[in-house]
Amino acid sequence: MNKIASLKPGDDGVLIEALINHVVSGKTNGAHRSTYLSMTLQDDTGSIDAKLWNASEEQVQTLVKGSVVQIKGDVIKYNEDRQMKIVKIHLASQDDKERIKFLKQAPLDSQFMINEIKKFIDQIDNLKLHQLVKTLFEENIEKLSYYPAASKNHHEYVSGLAYHTYGMLKVAESFCTLYPTLNKDLLYSGITLHDLGKTIELSGPVVPEYTIEGKLLGHISISQAMVKEMADKMNIEGEEVTLLQHMILSHHGKNEFGSPVLPQVKEAEIIYLIDNMDARINMLEKALETIEPGSFSKRVFALENRSFYKPKIG
């Protein structure tokens, strides 16, 4: 079996085993309107768009999101990206343990990242913040270790949430060295908990979908509510609790991006900038990883619908 990351336009008759991450059906134009399936396939190395022409009714019913399939197909170039024309397809094992094998993993080991995040928490000197952050982190540590950071766009893979959080903390560490007036305790606390609500907003790493709470409340308000509830439970009061909630509520930076309030504390502004930078870099890396040097990526909607050039120079 071939891995998706290795596929290149011109590869014919390749065999892959993959998870259906997304699938929609449609009808072709013309007098003889036939059914087709447009899907996104993924394995632990990446994803690729695919088309199954002349799909049968049985295939429409059985080839659903979350299914593991074995495929023979041809790889073509379409809209500056790879696409697979499916020649043969059939269902493989549908066991959850098998599904996890086809999910992309974070570049770093999850336990390593969790341990590193704990080290940052231990550097929080403010007692109220330290107790609050450590308790919330420990209570949600299992999901934090393997959940994705999103259902699409950035860090949307197993342990993506831990990788995103760890990366932000490393950047914040450098910022504190460069800008010594920054409050390290506030930065580390806000970053560690800013996306905590995603453990409730999303269904999990296998084809992540938004839960009812995720659709109706969103991770920003969920995270803020988790902090307030824990603070009340632990009888922690004071400016620390207010500031932590503010950094969570404002970390998307703008109302139109989902934050109910704008950053009004220096550390809140920095968290917004680091969060946005880390997400955008991750999207850039994903857009460029499968294209050849000297060519442009497909357009990335979340990056102002721009395409990006991959330089030939090393």
Image (cartoon, helix red, strand yellow):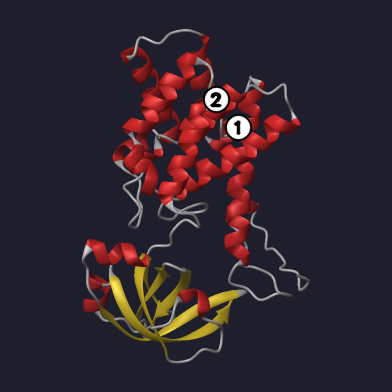
Q: Identify the residue at the far right of this view.
A: 313
Tags 1 and 2 in contact by the CB under 8 Å rule? yes
For the point 65% across and 28% down, which residue is it? 269
User: Closer to the N terminus: mark 1 or mark 2?
Assistant: 2
Give residue 276's position: percent from left, percent from top.
61, 42
Observer-nearest of 236 and 223: 236
Measured as percent of width and height from the top left, residue 211 is found at 31, 43
- Indicate the amino acid at tag 2: Met
> What residue is shown with label 1?
271
Nearer-the-camera pick, 108 or 269: 108
| Nearer-the-camera pick, 57 or 202 | 202
Q: Is residue 287 above or below residue 261?
A: below
Query: For the residue carrying disc 1, how many other residues have a C-alpha within 10 Å: few (<14), some (14-19), or many (20+)?
Result: many
Quarter occupied by residue 9: bottom right
- The answer for how far apart the CA atoms under marks 1 and 2 are is 7 Å
**Callout 1: helix, strand or loop?**
helix
**Residue under the image location 55 percent in, 89 percent down:** 10
**Percent from the top left, x then y, of residue 280?**
62, 50
Give the numbered dot on residue 247: 2
Q: Amino acid at mark 1?
A: Ile
Count how many numbered circles sit on residues in the image. Answer: 2
Crowd around label 2: few <14 · some 14–19 · many ≥20 (10 Å): many
The residue that appears at 63% across and 35% down in the rendered structure is: 172
Looking at the figure, which quarter contains the C terminus?
bottom right
Question: In which quadrant is the N terminus drawn?
Answer: bottom left
